[in-house]
Amino acid sequence: MKEEFISLNFLPLGQKAKVKMLTSEGTARRRMLDLGLALDTVVEALQKSPSGDPVAYNIRGAVIALRSEEASKVIVESL
């Protein structure tokens, strides 16, 4: 099976993925971990705002909105 890694901001709506890596550092990395974006966490893209940014994601049962810039630092594997 071929592994397909993409950044979270490219995850299509309704699609689920597993977190594989965070490329952010410092306080931005700490914030992502505090939001539940730890290794192997399942994330689902739910909906985009009318302007297209931010996007709402289901992370461990909570709905979290992330801007494209933030989501681009989260590397995921499509499920």
Image: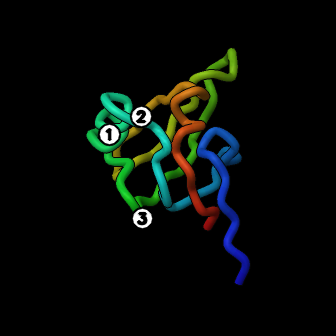
Q: How many marks?
A: 3
- Residue 40, numbered label: 3
- Name the element at disc 1: loop
- Name the element at disc 3: loop
Q: Which amino acid does label 2 sit on?
A: Ile
Give whichever of discs 1 and 3 has the lower sequence position: 1
The C terminus lies in quadrant:
bottom right
Q: Where is residue 17? Give x, y as percent.
A: 56, 59
Q: Residues within 10 Å of mark 2 (few under 14, many from 20)?
A: some
| Camera-side residue of 66 and 61 | 66
The Cα atoms of the two marked residues, 3 and 2, are separated by: 17 Å
Q: In this view, does 21 lie to the left or right of 47?
A: left
Q: Which amino acid does label 3 sit on?
A: Asp
The Cα atoms of the two marked residues, 1 and 3, are separated by: 14 Å
Give whichever of discs 3 and 2 has the lower sequence position: 3
Q: Do the residues labelled 1 and 2 touch (CB within 8 Å)?
A: yes
The Cα atoms of the two marked residues, 1 and 2, are separated by: 8 Å
Q: Please say if 38 is above or below 25.
A: below
- Residue 15, numbered label: none
Q: Name the residue under label 2.
A: 64
Q: Mark 1 points at which residue?
A: 35
